[in-house]
């Protein structure tokens, strides 16, 4: 190749680069779509209380078309049955074991003759991040406490829980499952999906603060008396507790 031919190619390349520069700059300025960020926390499970676990399981199956699975017994004297809502969330039907004195915070179960929402739990895979977000939002938290239950198959499920120091009736508790524990939403019967979790009560501002800090999927409203409403889409159609 002659020097003249080489020089001509260099000039041509420079001219093409000059023409392409504006287009390349425009492409660089357009940001590519990114995957949605994972929320820092989510609704882990919703508790439906009742005075008798067997009757509660039967009532849930008749209403939804999904038969809950017996979860096991808690050392504190309660026992439960579970149904998955998918996406890391499940329903926990909870009652006091027969012949056992109920723990102080579950004494009201004896008065519940139908499945009634009584509480909820929020989970995160990162305990430190969860606590940090709450505290950054001005919500002090308690120390963590260990918990566990044994399934009918003999497996032990374990977790850590904590709550808000300035607790209120509508507030959730917070749970971080052991890395060795399979999440109940993955091992319980499926078929139902969460449509709405709604809480009304006198602490709406606190709930909105919590919802915002953790990006939770929960609807809140003002009310003089606390009430909770769970709406599901199930094989038998729409179901509300």
Image: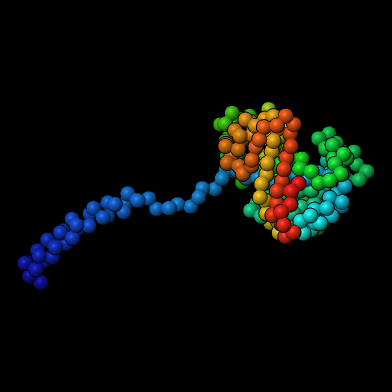
Q: Quadrant of the N terminus?
A: bottom left
Q: Which of 3 and 69 is in front in this view?
A: 69
Can residue 154 be seen from the camera position used here?
no
Q: Using the image, determine if residue 6 lies above or below residue 152.
A: below
Q: Using the image, determine if residue 209 lies above or below residue 72.
A: above
Q: Which residue is pictured at 14% across the width and 63% down the height?
A: 12
* Residue 111 in the figure: left or right of residue 69: right
Q: Using the image, determine if residue 140 lies above or below residue 187.
A: above
Q: Position of residue 121 (x, y in %)?
A: 69, 42
Q: Nearer the viewer, residue 66 or 241?
A: 241
Can residue 216 be seen from the camera position used here?
yes
* Residue 69 in the figure: left or right of residue 219: right
Q: Which residue is pictured at 15% across the width and 59% down the height?
A: 15
Q: Which residue is pictured at 72% across the width and 29% down the height?
A: 224
Most distant residue in the bottom direction: 1
Q: Position of residue 112 (x, y in %)?
A: 85, 41
Q: Where is residue 151 in the image (x, y as percent from the top left)?
A: 80, 53
Q: Which residue is pictured at 56% across the width and 45% down the height?
A: 39
Based on the displayed image, in which of its 4 quarters is residue 160 positioned? top right
Most distant residue in the right direction: 99
Based on the displayed image, in which of its 4 quarters is residue 229 positioned? top right
Image colouring: rainbow
Based on the displayed image, in which of its 4 quarters is residue 132 positioned? top right
Q: How many circles with numbers are drawn on the protein?
A: 0
Q: Which of 10 and 216 is in front in this view?
A: 216
Q: Position of residue 203 (x, y in %)?
A: 67, 30
């Amino acid at each position: 190749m002659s020097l003249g031919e080489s020089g001509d190619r260099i000039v041509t390349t420079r001219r093409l680069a000059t023409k392409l520069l504006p287009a390349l700059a425009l492409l660089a300025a357009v940001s590519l779509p990114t995957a949605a960020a994972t929320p820092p926390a989510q609704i882990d499970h919703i508790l439906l209380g009742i005075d008798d676990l067997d009757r509660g399981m039967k009532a849930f199956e008749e209403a939804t078309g999904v038969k809950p699975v017996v979860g096991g017994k808690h050392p504190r004297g309660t026992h439960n049955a579970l149904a998955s809502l998918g996406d890391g969330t499940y329903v926990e039907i909870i009652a006091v074991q027969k012949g056992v004195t109920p723990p102080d915070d579950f004494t009201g179960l004896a008065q519940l003759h139908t499945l009634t929402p009584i509480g909820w739990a929020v989970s995160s895979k990162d305990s430190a991040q969860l606590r940090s977000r709450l505290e950054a939002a001005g919500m002090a938290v308690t120390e963590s406490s260990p918990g566990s239950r044994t399934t009918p198959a003999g497996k032990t499920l374990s977790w850590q829980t904590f709550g808000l120091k300035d607790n209120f009736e509508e507030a959730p508790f917070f749970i971080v499952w052991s890395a060795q524990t399979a999440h109940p939403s993955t091992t319980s019967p499926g078929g139902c999906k969460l449509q709405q979790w709604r809480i009304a009560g006198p602490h709406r501002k606190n709930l909105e603060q919590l919802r915002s800090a953790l990006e939770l999927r929960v609807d809140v409203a003002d009310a003089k008396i606390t009430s909770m409403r769970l709406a599901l889409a199930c094989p038998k159609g729409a179901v509300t507790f």
